[in-house]
Image (tube, rainbow, N blue to C red):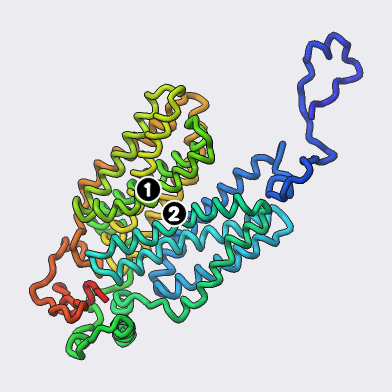
């Protein structure tokens, strides 16, 4: 509210509007009647408290960053299965608890906890998929989960439209996670991780269980070749920067994940600035992600991981730069370019998960994914700050969203190709360069394949088609 003029002010001073200072609304705020309860009107996120809404979003992004780093290392330490179960438990408990918070501060704290678990789950489940599924089906498996994420986003939009109370919406969106309690019995541990940790008997048990469920038959001779990797050792974050080949690969992937996230969130946050109805544009943005993610199946099989990653980054960057030169009175053209850019960045994100999981060796895979995930989440935190550059020059945000992905796309040429390649298990395997399938590979027995490790002569599971 405007501050009342001093008693000494003359009528001329008042009429000339010289007194325009404002003061807080000490008596509180009144909201329109029949307005459903929301975070804004329940916690008074208006006037001087309005920035708290952006603060909550920044805290959530910070939670994604912390979760990517913390759960990546935890997944290497306690295993893929245990880490995923812990993450699902944290998501279920904290998400439901958020619906009953009495204060905004507690709401923000619980959202931070949810974000850490969500970020960790995004990395750990891709790791588990990658280590169970063979090269020819790996992209399909990851794309299926990524597409489910996009469908869930659209379903959430429908829930928000039908449930106007934020607390009820929180319960409706969180309750389905509780149905995943059966994962405790159904979710298998990674056989590769078990072998890397020397737990051979447990690895044999999960492989036999998978074969039994899929009605496959395994011979004792095939399982007898599963022995622990003698050259395996525990990996840590420092190893990602200590070894030359691993260091080069990690630094490039850090750039790839950063710029892909920057372009993805940058286009999403500017959805209201393209000239068309914001709800229509958001619906289009959500719907375009499903075919974008499924397109990666064709791209990665036809052109390989490296060039697909490079191409999607460069295409997304070119679309952002093209938007700069389109007049604002052509909103349809601007939106069309933005949709193509969102298509490319969404596809690039999916490829990043598959490609990075295949590049990092088993012994340090979740840690590596966690580190590049931190880079991605850092970009998410910085994206709103990049948008502020538009206050000085309107074209600066789009210029950054466009030029940085193009540069990262060119760097991808320095990465090795992983299409149809067996996963590397140890850091030593990676430093020796990509290996082809060994001629001593055990013949596939009704869909199960084990490959002898060239470095130590020990057999390790190369891929499992069950």
The residue sitting at 31% across, 77% down in the picture is: 191
Is residue 26 toward the left or the right of residue 350 in the image?
right
Residue 266 falls left or right of residue 92: left
Q: Position of residue 17 (x, y in %)?
A: 78, 15
Q: Residue furthest right?
A: 7
Q: Quadrant of the C terminus?
A: bottom left
**Quadrant of res 97:** bottom right
Q: Nearer the viewer, mark 2 or mark 1?
A: 2
Q: Callout 2: few (<14), some (14-19), or many (20+) C-alpha neighbours within 10 Å?
A: some
> Which residue, given by chain and number where applicable, does mark 1 sit on?
346
The local crowd at label 1, few if under 14, some if 14 to 19, many if 20 or more residues have their Cα within 10 Å, is many
Quadrant position of residue 20: top right
Which structural element holds mark 2? Answer: helix
Helix, strand or loop at mark 1: helix
Res 416 visible: no
Horizontal placement of 326 versus 462: left or right? right
Q: Which residue is mark 2?
A: 150
Relative image position of residue 279 (x, y in whole percent) = 53, 41
Q: Position of residue 432 (x, y in %)?
A: 16, 63
- The number of numbered discs placed on residues in the rendered structure image is 2
353 lies above or below 235:
above
In the picture, the quarter occupied by the N terminus is: top right
Residue 7 to residue 447: above or below = above
Disc 2 and disc 1 in contact, CB within 8 angstroms: yes
The residue lying toward the viewer, choosing from 22 and 164, is: 164
Q: Could you tell me which residue is drawn at 40 percent across and 74 percent down?
A: 79
As drawn, 136 above or below 272? below
Is any atom of residue 290 visible in this view?
yes
Q: Earlier in the sequence, mark 2 or mark 1?
A: 2
């Amino acid at each position: 509210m405007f501050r009342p003029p001093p008693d000494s002010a003359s009528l001329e001073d008042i009429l000339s509007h010289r007194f325009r200072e404002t003061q807080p609304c000490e008596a509180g705020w009144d909201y329109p009647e029949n307005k459903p309860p929301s975070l804004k009107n329940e916690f008074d996120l208006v006037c001087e408290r309005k920035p708290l809404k952006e603060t909550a979003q920044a805290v959530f992004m910070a939670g994604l960053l912390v979760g990517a780093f913390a759960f990546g290392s935890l997944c290497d330490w306690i295993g893929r299965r245990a880490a995923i179960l812990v993450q699902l438990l944290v998501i279920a408990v904290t998400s439901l608890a958020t619906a009953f918070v009495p204060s905004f501060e507690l709401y923000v704290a619980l959202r931070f906890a949810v974000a850490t678990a969500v970020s960790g789950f995004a990395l750990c489940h891709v790791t588990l998929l990658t280590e169970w599924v063979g090269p020819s089906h790996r992209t399909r498996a990851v794309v299926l989960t990524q597409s489910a994420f996009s469908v869930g986003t659209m379903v959430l939009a429908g829930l928000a439209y039908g449930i106007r109370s934020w607390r009820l919406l929180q319960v409706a969106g969180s309750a389905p996670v509780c149905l995943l309690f059966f994962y405790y019995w159904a979710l298998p541990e990674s056989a590769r991780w078990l072998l890397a940790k020397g737990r051979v008997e447990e690895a044999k048990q999960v492989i036999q269980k998978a074969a039994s469920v899929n009605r496959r038959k395994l011979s004792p001779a095939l399982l007898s070749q599963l022995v622990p990797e003698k050259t395996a050792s525990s990996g840590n974050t420092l190893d990602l920067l200590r070894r030359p080949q691993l260091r080069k690969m990690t630094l490039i992937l850090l750039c790839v994940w950063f710029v892909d996230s920057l372009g993805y969130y940058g286009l999403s946050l500017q959805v209201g600035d393209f000239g068309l109805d914001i709800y229509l544009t958001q619906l289009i943005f959500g719907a375009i992600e499903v075919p974008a993610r499924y397109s990666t199946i064709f791209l990665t099989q036809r052109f390989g991981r490296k060039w697909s990653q490079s191409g999607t980054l460069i295409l997304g960057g070119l679309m952002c730069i093209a938007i700069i030169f389109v007049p604002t009175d052509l909103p349809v053209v601007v939106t069309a370019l933005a949709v193509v850019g969102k298509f490319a960045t969404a596809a690039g994100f999916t490829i990043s998960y598959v490609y990075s999981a295949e590049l990092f060796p088993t012994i340090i895979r979740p840690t590596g994914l966690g580190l590049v995930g931190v880079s991605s989440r850092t970009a998410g935190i910085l994206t709103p700050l990049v948008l502020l550059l538009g206050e000085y020059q309107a074209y600066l945000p789009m210029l950054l969203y466009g030029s940085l992905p193009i540069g990262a796309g060119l760097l991808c040429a320095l990465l090795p190709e992983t299409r149809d390649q067996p996963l590397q298990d140890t850091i030593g395997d990676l430093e020796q360069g990509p290996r082809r399938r060994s001629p001593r590979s055990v013949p596939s027995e009704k869909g199960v394949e084990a490959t002898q490790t060239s470095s130590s002569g020990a057999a390790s599971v190369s891929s499992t088609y069950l």
